Amino acid sequence: MPENLSNIALIVGGSRGIGRATAIRLARSGCDIWLTYRGNHEQAKITQEQIQQLGRKCDLLCFDVSDHEATEKALRNRAEETAPSIIVYNAGITRDNLLVWMKPEEWSAVIRTDLDGFYNVMNSVLFSMLRARRGRIVAVASISGQVGQAGQVNYSAAKAGLIGACKALAREIGKRNIIVNVVAPGLIETDMTAGLPKEQILPMIPLGRIGQPDDVASVIEFLCRESSMYIHGQVIGINGGLST
Ligand code: NAP
């Protein structure tokens, strides 16, 4: 049986960017971290070291979330032993293109990682959390999933799907004291957005700055606090006013 009260936070896609900032925030607030990533060992190790310097444990788990079998192999038995108390589903990719030019693999890579991956992780871990009758789930969607974005039909569809999945899951498992919410970042400075023309987007952001990973991590940490436990099934925009 899983321990009833673990202090483990599973950060899916935690090697870099928003996931790293979230892992560090949650480690600072007392969590040990299971940090997953796809293949960037160097960045994952840097994050692990930063967490260990805070006096917390950090297990690195390298697998592709779009692969159900690999995800299950990495997570199911581990979660059966000790249920994580927090899951942050942050893994995501973009393959931007106009729909008419979009290749099938650009469509499916994004859907498989940003949406199917959520199912793969939850299907592997949720049962242990249900038995523990306690938990927090936060998924990282996007403003693109809320309002749509030209050139990102695949990504917008995946993130809108993720929002729908979390709203449904919130209704399904709320009674088990598992809180489910979504954050929807706008433009955040990470590897994912390194190639975007920021000077063109900046005038559209009322706060007049690009977001930093910690702008998102601080909201995720807030949603995981005991004092936030009446926020459930919500989508919290973190976008500097880009969409209201
Ligand atoms: P990032 O710096 O590119 O980091 C992506 C993370 O996801 C990395 O840890 C990466 O692992 C992992 N990952 C990607 N594909 C994976 C796969 N198939 N299996 C396992 N792990 C995988 O991205 P970010 O900008 O921090 O974005 C994090 C999340 O926020 C994403 O879901 C993204 O869609 C969302 N978001 C970002 C922005 C933004 O402006 N940056 C805005 C809105 C929403 P590796 O390091 O091993 O590749």
Image (cartoon, rainbow, N blue to C red):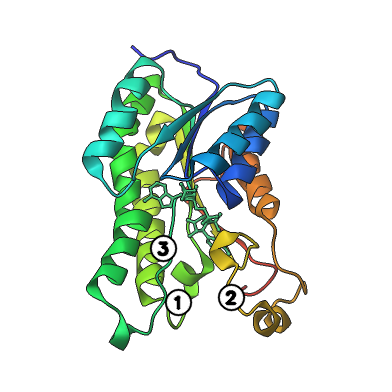
The image quarter containing residue 187 is bottom right
User: Residue 18 location in percent, x, y?
Assistant: 59, 51
Q: Mark 1 near mark 2, Cβ–Cβ under 8 Å?
A: no
Element on which disc 3 rests: helix
Check disc 3 and give the amino acid type: Lys
The residue indicated by pointer 2 is: 196
Mark 3 or 2: in front is: 2
Q: Earlier in the sequence, mark 3 or mark 2?
A: 3
In the rendered structure, the answer to whether residue 176 lies left or right of residue 244 reads: left
Would the CB of label 3 be found within 8 Å of ligand 1? yes
Query: Of the residues under marks 3 and 1, which one precedes in the sequence?
Result: 1
Q: Quadrant of the N terminus?
A: top left
Q: Residue sitting at 35 percent across and 27 percent down?
A: 130
Residue 204: x %, y % from top left: 68, 82
Along the line of sight, the residue nearer the viewer: 84 or 94: 94
Q: Nearer the viewer, residue 168 or 17?
A: 17
* Mark 2, other Cα within 10 Å: few <14 / some 14–19 / many ≥20: few
**Among numbered discs 1 and 2, the one appearing first in the sequence:** 1
Spatial CA distance of label 1 from label 2 is 17 Å
Compared with 31, 234 (above or below) is below
Mark in front: 1 vs 2: 2
Read off the residue under disc 1.
148
Amino acid identity at mark 2: Leu
Q: Which residue is mark 3?
A: 159
Q: Residue at x 35, y 69 (%)?
A: 157
